[in-house]
Image (cartoon, helix red, strand yellow):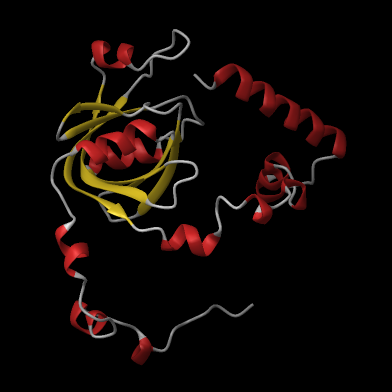
Amino acid sequence: MTAFEPKPEYVIKDETALRGLFPPTHELAAKKCMATLDKHARDFIERSPFLCLGTQNADGKADVSPRGDPPGFVKILDPHTLAIPDRPGNNRLDSLVNIVSNPSVGLLFVVPGFDDTLRVNGQAALVVDPELLDAMSVNGRSPKVAIVVTITSIFMHCAKAFRRSHLWDTDRFQDRSGMPSLMKIITDQTAETPASDEELTAMDQKLEESYRKTLY
């Protein structure tokens, strides 16, 4: 397949050209951005069991990572500050390494069944204060690191994306068996020789066992 290259005359290169394509921002959309948590933002965060964390490294290379736990897992430390526990993962540490070199982060909070979302932008720091980490322990296990975010802007995002995608519509749910297992996909992408069915079954079982033992 030939690599796609957009024609230069059709590439938008400045904000003026971009905004010329769209009508002006609605007054409410412009005014809704806050710098501190109000009661509605607090309620949304306390209900949310899932967020996406956007980071960039010093060179501007971007990354987005999912974060999930029971509702209320993100701690509200004060009207300007949030703390996100870093639970065990694959130890790539992409988001954490990015934060060390570039503290600017973006958060997207999701509540199951809600079509609207909450967007938070801010400056993050990696904190290892034992008192804070212990306050976020689950099953007696504290996270090694907390991502503490000082909020610079926060606002509700409308439902259009979720409505278009029918994300919560169970009639639109897809059968996971329509694609190979995660381990099959990864071995296809990384192994020099294909794994046998027996090997894949063993790897799938090992992954499920890891989920049971190392979520926290």
Seen in the image, is 68 located left or right of residue 130? Answer: right
Seen in the image, is 93 located left or right of residue 177? Answer: left
Residue 26's quadrant in the figure?
A: bottom left
| Rendering coords of residue 8 (x, y %) | 36, 88
| Rendering coords of residue 41 (x, y %) | 25, 40
> Does residue 107 show up?
yes
Depicted 45 relative to depicted 33: above or below = above
Q: Nearer the viewer, residue 156 or 14?
A: 156
Residue located at (70% from left, 43% from top): 187
Q: Nearer the viewer, residue 144 or 30?
A: 30
Screen quadrant of the N terminus: bottom right
Q: Residue furthest bottom?
A: 9
Seen in the image, is 101 located left or right of residue 53? Answer: left
Q: Nearer the viewer, residue 14 or 34?
A: 34
| Figure label count | 0
Residue located at (38% from left, 33% from top): 47
| Rendering coords of residue 189 (x, y %) | 66, 50
